[in-house]
Each structure stands twice: as structure tokens, then as C-alpha cells.
Image: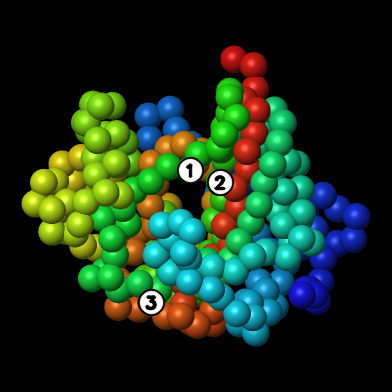
Amino acid sequence: MSLPLSYPVGHAGRFFNATPRIDEVEVGPGQFCYVVDDALIDPEGLVAWADRHRFEPAEANAYPGRLMDCVPTLEQSLDGFFTHHIRRRLGARRTVGMYARFSLVTLAPAALQPGQWQCHRDRVAIDPALCAASVLYLFRDVRLGGTAFYRPRCTAVQLERMLGDAQALGVAEFSARYGVGPGYMTASNDHFEQTGHVPAAWNRLVFYDGGQFHSGHIAHPELLSDGARHGRLTLNGFFACRRGAS
């Protein structure tokens, strides 16, 4: 697949704004994310391109919708932007792997499984490791939702038991045991405290520590669509990094 978008040739992070304004936002005690508005040079072109290609149901992970692989040129550009502008801010010193994908949240709340009712962490298999993550909002209707951040209210043992039960138990049994029901997580509950929220905005790119619990803040699921032009389209990046010396 070709990607005929304009970009500044030779610049680290091509396709992206060469002189970004980066805002640091606190999303929990000692936790920060980095927000870049007007991130892409040609966001309309990217949405139009995505709309011409096929998204597949997310079968290998718990994502509540449809996914499409990112093309290498854009993936490399996102990696370059992360390396040049963000990596050190997140306390990382070297990237050992990354990938990116396009995502569309499409599932109605009643169709969600227990593991999709709550926030989650991103993990990587290196130690010591930091899994940095990014989300680029490619929709204009901000009611489709940004990203919220959380911290557990329970012990580590209780947390691991609940996360395991979310994968093993059926809807009714999990709901009865933990007092939560089907739906997208948008607020604190008995198990997690919401510590921060970054609203969506057109062409806004957010970087954060994927090891912090987080979730899409989808308060209006009735607006979700399976079309890239009108749905909750995002470009998501995942960066496995070595942590910097403390």
C-alpha cells in the first residue's frame, strides 16, 4: 500500500510537524503524558487514505473494534518523532522495537467482554523495560472520546486475581463477583481511581507510559461507527524501550 502524503523530506519524524509544541500533562502522581496538537502535516489525507482500505476485526487481542496495520513509511516516521521529541521525556534511553496500527472502536457496550469493561496496561517482554505508547486522534467529533488514566485501589494480589477473572469468567459471573457491568470505563469505580483525562482533539497526538493503567474515554458509544471518515479512528504506536539510568 502506498501512502501519497506530503512530508518534509529528510526530517526526523516526516509526515509530522517539524516544530511541534509539546505540552506536559499530569495524569497521576508522578505520571505525565505529552500532548502534541497539529501533529500531522496532512491529517485529512491520512483519513482519506485509511477510508480506502480494509480494517479487520481484532481477534488476537482485546481491542473493542477493528484494526489495520500501519504502512512502514508512516510507522518509521512516528518512530522518528518519538525518538527525536519524546523518548527522553518519558525516561527511556533506547528503543528496541516498535509497531503502529490504525484502530476503530466499533463495539456496542452490550457486546463487550469483561476484559474490555476496564482499563488496561501495555506490556513488553524486556527487563528493565518501558512500554511507551501513543494515540493520534483522527476524528473531529470530540464526543467520541479521548484517553483516561487510572491507578488501582486494591492490592496487587487482588488486582491480578481480578484481571485473571476478566479473561476466565463469563459476563454474568464476573459482573456479580466484582460489581461492574458491561460498558466502556469512563470514571472511577471500586477497583480503580481515575487520575487523569486527556480530551480528544482533531490531529492531537498523545504519548504516555503504557505501563500506567489507561482506557479510551468513550462516554457516547452511540456515536461509534465502523467507517474511518466518521468513526473513532486513531493511529496507535507502541515503543519497547530500555529505561534510562536512574
Query: In terms of depth relative to the viewer, which is nearer, 64 or 31?
Result: 64
Q: Position of residue 220 (x, y in %)?
A: 30, 71
Can you tell which quarter of the image residue 163 is in?
top left
SS for dot 2: strand
Quadrant housing the N terminus = bottom right
User: Which dot marks residue 122?
Assistant: 1
SS for dot 3: loop
Instruction: Tell me what residue is drawn at x 58 percent, y 23 percent.
Output: 128
Q: Count of labels shown?
A: 3
Callout 2–callout 1 Cβ contact below 8 Å: yes
User: Which dot marks residue 61?
Assistant: none
- Look at mark 3 in the image and give the residue it sits on: 224
User: Which dot marks residue 133?
Assistant: 2
Q: Nearer the viewer, mark 2 or mark 1?
A: 1
Q: Is residue 16 above or below residue 44?
A: above
Callout 3–callout 2 Cβ contact below 8 Å: no
Instruction: Tell me what residue is drawn at x 77 percent, y 54 percent.
Output: 76
SS for dot 1: loop
Query: In terms of depth relative to the viewer, which is nearer, 241 or 32?
Result: 241
Q: Is residue 123 above or below residue 216?
A: above
Q: Is residue 68 above or below residue 11?
A: below
